[in-house]
Image (spheres, rainbow, N blue to C red):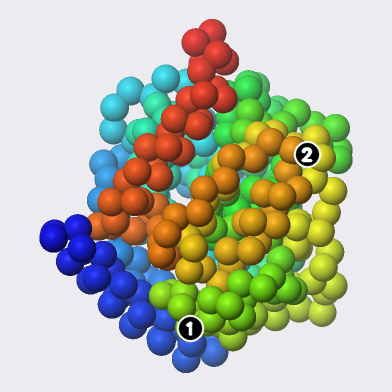
């Protein structure tokens, strides 16, 4: 009964946020909404956050969960449509993943559009990975993770590292990733009005703000259209009612080594939302996946 009431309350809050986002016509208005809603919906988690520092030209922060990290590192790329940043949401999400995985988190605070349009965010994320490699971090201990737009950036960073002959991380975790900014997936129309968080018209503004005047089918913008061979194992999560569901399903069909789960009636990036039992279960599964792919390396530390 209690879980059902919590889920109902979450859905009502998301419906209100969806209506507000539909009316938000500017990035500044979206940022205001994210700042207001973030503390209300975010999960509660104990962690320490470092001061921002220069990670090879990108700004980054360490997120250390409560407990005793065992040596793994989650290089994290946050969501919010390439235009906003919500530490109130993403810091505790990364801390929860780190707690479950026994790992530290490194949050990349990449430059935001439209003030800094594509390729600023992709360059910052790649710079952070270059910094980790040049500083001596073992790539076998590192997992890329990202939600929504951050899932896009995690995949684009891995593809660029592959193409430039750099070491790849041990694995990737992509939660409700935005992978096709042409929004050609059938779920855009199929789940429009069903998705509790977004309408199709809201999502389609992203390309205008993130990559104005660009070819949105460019794989550096929409990695679903790129070459997907030679990438590390990936864990993909999405909710069945998301307008972006087909981004995850199409990626899963093309990746060589993907573990994909579609969670019934769960909203966009549901592991970040407080009060969802499925979110807690997903965090535990993400932690197990990260441990599975980093344990051997971390035991050697």
Establish if 228 lies above or below 247: above
Query: Which quadrant would residue 297 be assigned to in this image?
Result: top right
Q: Which-is-in-front pick, marks 1 and 2?
A: 1
Along the viewing direction, whichever of 297 and 249 lies nearer the viewer: 249
Along the viewing direction, whichever of 200 and 246 lies nearer the viewer: 246
Instruction: Identify residue for label 1.
Output: 193
- Density class for disc 1 (Cα within 10 Å; few <14, some 14-19, many ≥20) is some
- Density class for disc 2 (Cα within 10 Å; few <14, some 14-19, many ≥20) is some
**Circle number at residue 161:** 2
- In this view, which residue lies farthest toward the top? 300
Query: Which quadrant would residue 148 be assigned to in this image?
Result: bottom right
Residue at 48% from the left image edge and 83% from the top image edge:
193
Please tell me whether mark 2 sits on a helix, a strand or a loop: helix
Residue at 29% from the left image edge and 27% from the top image edge:
67
- In this view, which residue lies farthest toward the left? 1
Please tell me whether mark 1 sits on a helix, a strand or a loop: loop
**Circle number at residue 268:** none
Establish if 189 lies above or below 165: below
Along the viewing direction, whichever of 26 and 148 lies nearer the viewer: 148
Residue 124 lies, in percent from the top left, at 67, 51
The quarter of the picture where the N terminus appears is: bottom left
Residue 251 lies, in percent from the top left, at 70, 53
Can the viewer see residue 173? yes
Residue 98 lies, in percent from the top left, at 41, 35
- What is the C-alpha distance between the residues marked 1 and 2? 38 Å
Left or right of 59 on screen, residue 47: left
Establish if 294 lies above or below 174: above
Residue 249 lies, in percent from the top left, at 64, 56
Residue at 41% from the left image edge and 86% from the top image edge:
20
């Amino acid at each position: 009964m209690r879980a059902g009431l919590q889920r109902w309350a979450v859905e009502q809050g998301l419906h209100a946020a969806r209506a507000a986002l539909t009316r938000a016509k500017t990035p500044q208005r979206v940022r205001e909404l994210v700042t207001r809603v973030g503390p209300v919906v975010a999960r509660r988690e104990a962690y320490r956050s470092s001061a921002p520092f220069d990670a090879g030209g990108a700004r980054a922060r360490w997120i250390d969960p409560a407990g005793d990290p065992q040596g793994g590192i989650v290089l994290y790329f946050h969501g919010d449509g390439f235009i906003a940043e919500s530490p109130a949401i993403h810091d505790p999400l990364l801390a929860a993943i780190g707690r479950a995985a026994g790992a530290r988190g490194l949050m990349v605070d990449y430059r935001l559009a439209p003030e800094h349009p594509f390729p600023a965010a992709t360059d910052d994320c790649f710079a952070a990975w270059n910094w980790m490699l040049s500083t001596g971090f073992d790539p076998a201990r590192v997992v890329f993770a990202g939600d929504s737009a951050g899932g896009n950036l995690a995949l684009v960073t891995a593809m660029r590292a592959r193409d430039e002959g750099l070491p790849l991380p041990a694995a990737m975790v992509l939660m409700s990733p935005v992978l096709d900014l042409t929004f050609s997936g059938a779920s855009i129309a199929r789940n429009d009005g069903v998705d509790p968080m977004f309408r199709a018209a809201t999502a389609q503004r992203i390309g205008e703000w993130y990559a104005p005047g660009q070819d949105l089918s460019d794989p550096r913008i929409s990695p679903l259209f790129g070459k997907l061979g030679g990438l590390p194992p990936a864990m993909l999560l999405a909710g069945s009612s998301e307008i972006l569901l087909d981004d995850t399903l199409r990626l899963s069909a093309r990746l060589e080594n993907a573990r994909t789960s579609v969670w019934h009636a769960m909203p966009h990036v549901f592991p970040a939302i407080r009060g969802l039992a499925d979110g807690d279960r997903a965090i535990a599964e993400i932690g197990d996946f990260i441990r599975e792919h980093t344990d051997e390396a971390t035991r050697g530390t």
